[in-house]
Image: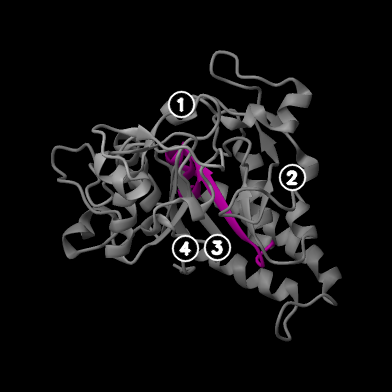
Amino acid sequence: MSDGTAIQWTDASWNPVTGCTKVSPGCAHCYIVTTPAFRIAGRKFVNGATDIRFHSQRLPQPLTWWRPRRIFVTSLGDLFHEAIPDAFIARVYGVMVAAYWHEFQVLTKRPERRLALLRDEVFRELVRAEAAQLINALRGYDHVRPPGDKSRAYWGTVNLASWYEGAARNIWEGVTAENQRWADQRIPELLATPAAVRFVSYEPALGPVDFDHIDCTSDSDPGFSALTWTEDDEGTLGDAVLDWVIVGGESGPRARPFDIEWARSVVRQCQAAGVACFVKQLGAKPQVQESDRYYLNGWHEPGPRILRFHDRKGGDMSEWPEDLRMREFPEVRHD
């Protein structure tokens, strides 16, 4: 939809489908209805849902963007919403596989449907057929070559082979987890999903999350670390771990408080495990405890306090405690 974006952890957004239904507390103050595209069209949440709209004309957009970039897929919805047909999702994946020179970031709150589709041979064949058709069309652009002496169609075929073997080299799969409950529910599905990068968007952060103790909610499974792998984890999810964690407090006039100690904890967890961490923003209501208040403001009064930054979203790193100034990207792994 937009070759460019204000979202700090991506380069562009692409919305072949828009609209969603609220499914967890992080959705309560969803930003999508505040965007110009929704305001102009008069689209609002009614009983926790907006209408789902398909924009087939946007499907080819990434194929027209020749400069490589990270692309956030369906930033104004959820690609795995139950109202979106499997065949349409396959078309989206076909474009992602064919446009191998980009890195696509697919974020969902419905990882169980994604995992089921990516394991389904019929769905994978639909993607393969769509991608093969698009790759063949790329042969008309062989005069526009990536680095090296191979054509775009050649490298598209290489990426298609990777898809056929398990996971495309350029598709990052992620989930949103706003607190421990939703981390426990969504991360196991994510780690079972084939991907070049597996990531968690811990935003809007609404409570602390311990990524080293993910509860599978099974009486026979004691839980596991999503950041490091040991032989004890092999029976659960193999050697899959997270590659990237994004941290962010909530913004907007109805933002809920974000204790910066939650962010500090996640940063420490990622550093200890060698996992990339990207602190996006501290939100509109970053909250500090007594020990932080002296460090930041020179105050000694007991109890928490909401900090006030010049940046209303708390996105200016120069205003943060130094240990939270971290914006790392993961190394792309090809499973």
Percent x, y of residue 15: 69, 42
Q: CA distance from mark 3 to mark 4?
A: 22 Å
Q: CA distance from mark 2 to mark 3?
A: 22 Å
Q: Residue at x 72, y 82 (%)?
A: 150
Query: Which mark sits nearer the N-terminus, 3 or 4?
Result: 3
Q: CA distance from mark 4 to mark 1?
A: 29 Å
Query: Which mark sits nearer the N-terminus, 2 or 4?
Result: 2
Range of the magenta residues?
99-120
Residue highlighted by disc 3: 168
Disc 3 residue type?
Answer: Ala
Query: Which mark sits nearer the N-terminus, 2 or 3?
Result: 2
Residue highlighted by disc 2: 1
Residue 66 shown left or right of residue 18 in the figure: right
Q: Is residue 221 magenta?
A: no
Percent x, y of residue 41: 77, 24
Q: Residue at x 19, y 38 (%)?
A: 218
Label 3 CA crowd tier, 10 Å (few <14, some 14–19, many 20+): many
Residue highlighted by disc 4: 328
